[in-house]
């Protein structure tokens, strides 16, 4: 099924349209959620919850709008909810559990964790998913000018942390 057809038919569709949406957007959403949560298993859970929410709320999806942007918005809020729950659990138990993931190196993972979830999501969307600011505007419901500034700040913050924690990144900077 084509993207445009799916955008039109998702709200009134059923399991076939959901299956098409999962096939089309499942992997990109998994990468996106992983960039926010920095935990592959939690990212898988977030994507599953995203599609469950989307399917249950498909009647509220407005035909003619971007299904992709709608799903990214749902996955973003799902990830933020997971992070909030995780924070509460951490405060209650006073111990943090980390699951290692081979998809992101430890240096980069530590550096990404210094960014806010919104900053991580924005950096990922620009670099990995190569989304335009216009696309991001509909996902984050923020102006392109604001998104550009937030992205630049996040990128600068990330570069600074990487240079401080790993001499390799400092050598890259000096080599320019």
Image (cartoon, rainbow, N blue to C red):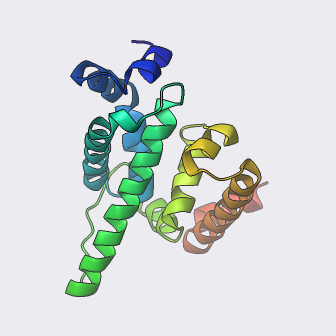
Q: Position of residue 83 (x, y in %)?
A: 36, 67
Q: Is residue 106 among the parts visible in the rendering? A: yes
Query: Quarter-wise, where is residue 12 in the image?
Result: top left
**In the image, residue 63 above or below residue 73:** above
Q: How many marks?
A: 0
Which percent across, then down, holds residue 170? 67, 65
Q: Position of residue 43 (x, y in %)?
A: 32, 51
Residue 95 sits in quarter: bottom left
Q: Where is the N terminus found, in terms of image quarters?
A: top left
Q: Is residue 144 above or below residue 10?
A: below
Question: Considering depth in this image, is 36 or 50 the residue closer to the camera?
Answer: 50
The reply, left or right, for residue 10 in relation to residue 70 is left
Q: Nearer the viewer, residue 73 or 125?
A: 73
* Quadrant location of the C terminus in the rendered image: bottom right
Q: Is residue 104 visible?
A: no
- Along the viewing direction, whichever of 102 and 84 lies nearer the viewer: 84
Write the residue at 41% across / 56% down. 77
Q: Nearer the viewer, residue 165 or 67?
A: 67
Left or right: 102 in relation to 162: left
Is 100 located above or below residue 161 in the figure?
above
Residue at 35% in and 33% down: 59
Q: Quadrant of residue 133?
A: top right
């Amino acid at each position: 099924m084509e993207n445009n057809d799916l955008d039109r038919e998702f709200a009134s569709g059923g399991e076939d349209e959901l299956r098409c949406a999962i096939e089309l957007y499942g992997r990109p959403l998994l990468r996106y959620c992983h960039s926010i949560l920095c935990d592959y298993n939690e990212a898988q859970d977030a994507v599953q919850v995203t599609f469950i929410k989307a399917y249950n709320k498909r009647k509220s999806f407005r035909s003619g709008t971007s299904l992709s942007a709608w799903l990214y918005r749902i996955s973003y809020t799902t990830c933020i909810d997971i992070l909030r729950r995780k924070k509460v659990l951490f405060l209650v138990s006073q111990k943090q559990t980390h699951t290692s993931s081979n998809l992101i190196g430890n240096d980069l993972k530590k550096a990404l964790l210094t960014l806010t979830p919104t900053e991580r999501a924005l950096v990922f969307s620009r670099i990995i998913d190569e989304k335009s600011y216009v696309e991001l505007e509909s996902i984050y419901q923020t102006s392109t000018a604001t998104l550009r500034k937030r992205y630049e700040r996040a990128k600068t913050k990330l570069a600074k942390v990487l240079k401080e924690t790993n001499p390799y990144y400092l050598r890259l900077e000096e080599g320019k």
